[in-house]
Image: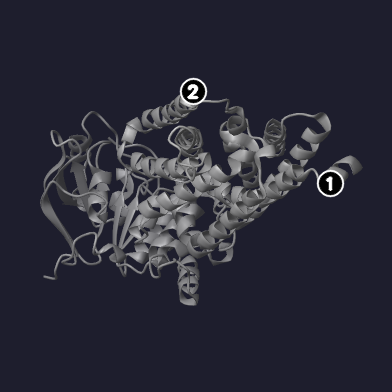
Amino acid sequence: MTELFAALTDPDLPFLRYGLLTGLLASISFGIIGTFVVVRRISYLAGAISHCILAGIGGGLYLQTVAGISWFTPMTGAVIVALLSAVILAQVSRHAGQREDSIIGALWSGGMSIGYLFIAKTPGYFDPNSYLFGNILLITKQDIFFVAGLDILILAVVCLFYNKLLALCFDEEYAFLRGVRTQWLHLLLLCLTALTIVLLIRIVGIIMVIALLTLPAAIAGGFAASIRQMMLIATAVCAVFITAGLGASFYLDLPSGSVIILIATGAYLLSLFLDRSAAKK
Amino acid sequence: MSEAAIEIRDLRFSYSHDIPVLSDVRLDVWPQDSACIVGPNGGGKTTLVKLMLGLLEPDSGSIRIGGQTPAAARTRIGYVPQYARYDACFPISALEVVCMARLGGTFSGRYMKQDKQAALDALAAVSLADLARRPFSALSGGQRQRVLIARALASGGDILILDEPTASLDRESEQQLLALLAELNKERIVLMVTHEVGFSSTFFKRIICVNNLVYVHPTSALTGELIREMYGGDLRMIRHDHRCCPGGHEHD
């Protein structure tokens, strides 16, 4: 424990400190947005957004390196593609009907393919694993401010539209009948989900971000009596997973993203088992 | 004669434009009317309700609710969907569910003091005031259905439309629900989609038979032959209100 504490306070090892701070701040966004994703049952949409992001990362890298557009960083590309995919998916949910899952599948794998092609055509060496599985070495001081800004944005939007978001998730048709513009609200929710995913792929990566978005909220759902409670519990659970995962990966010298997700998955399975045991009694 | 509260004229609706789900519908619903909407699966009952709510647009013909289009008259209608369609694990209280009736008043959807009071009054009207803070998932089927009726009442409309509220309810809850609807019918129109044609004669004044075409009969005219014609095939009618031996018996 003292080793970890020493590493966290070591001025020469800022990445661990940045990683932990970003992770703890990220827990707020994950807890709030994850709750909506779970109760609205749109984790497949969040999964599609996260995988589409590779197209933005690859595109950004290509434009930066080949076209010389220095301001178009991989993260800029990721934000643009994430928001674009949120808009497309909102339209798909509304119009595609029974073909929705096929279209989502096409976007999911198509986005990844485009991203990988851009990366393959970009000269020089680039390791996509950092984005696919996360790498806290990539977290900068700037990211901490971005995540803190995202937390403030999400808290402000959710506080403002809490009742409408609750109605959208519980009974979309009724919310529409009461005059709520459900289409726009659904789009807003998907855009916030997209931004949350973009800013947090540095920690756990594109492939595993969906687990950290949904598992803490799914665990919280078993104990919460209201959405507010579910958000608070999910935030706390997520913070515990990230702290424990970073600590364990430091001691065991393992990739932090994978360790965090394994802890989250184990805790979720345990909560399911406890739930079933309690139900039998 | 007073003006019809709901007036449907020459309505046609189809999902694919080839095969109409509803054709040549002409229907008048009067103030303080009570009618059950019955018919076979796929006959167009739910489609008719969705057209009245303005969730669907007719191919041709018109629907007027108090002279307005359904979309403009939504505040007049309290809609009660089936409780069984809701996520049983959703963490929400009965009061929060009922408060949803007051959404749309402000840009953010924030509830005012009077909104919460209206929701509490509606819960009291369905005898659930004590369970306002109880999670929706912890209530019984009958209680959940009554919470949804309270939500419809809190919206303040004079038309109540219920979609199969007795499905999944036991006999006692069903009787309680019908008694509540009879009470509510004193001040508002009650329309109810149901498959339980048997008890319709005990409460509703009229029966709206929907099977592509729409026919309206007084419930006193409800016979086994009429039901057979409507549903097709050989089916038996069970009168819930009629028992001449313990447990009741069945009639053709």
Coloured how? Answer: one colour
The crowding category of the residue bearing disc 2, from other C-alpha atoms within 10 Å (few below 14, some 14 to 19, many at least 20), is some
- The quarter of the image holding the N terminus of chain A is top right
The residue carrying mark 1 is A10
Q: Closest to the observer: B210 or A76?
A: A76
User: Looking at numbered disc 2 in the image, what kind of residue is underneath it?
Assistant: Ala
Q: Position of residue A89 (x, y in %)?
A: 39, 40
- The quarter of the image holding the C terminus of chain A is top right
Question: Chain under label 2?
Answer: A
SS at mark 2? Answer: helix
| Residue at position x 19%, y 67% in the image | B66
B80 shown above or below B84? below
Disc 1 + disc 2, Cβ < 8 Å: no
Question: What's the CA distance linking mark 1 and mark 2?
Answer: 37 Å
The crowding category of the residue bearing disc 1, from other C-alpha atoms within 10 Å (few below 14, some 14 to 19, many at least 20), is few
Question: Chain under label 1?
Answer: A
Q: Is residue A40 visible?
A: no
Q: Position of residue A56 (x, y in %)?
A: 46, 37
The residue carrying mark 2 is A120
Q: Residue furthest front?
A: A68
Q: Is residue A56 visible?
A: yes
Question: Which quadrant of the figure has residue A184?
Answer: bottom left
SS at mark 1? Answer: loop
For marks 1 and 2, the one nearer the N-term is: 1
Q: Position of residue A270 (x, y in %)?
A: 72, 34
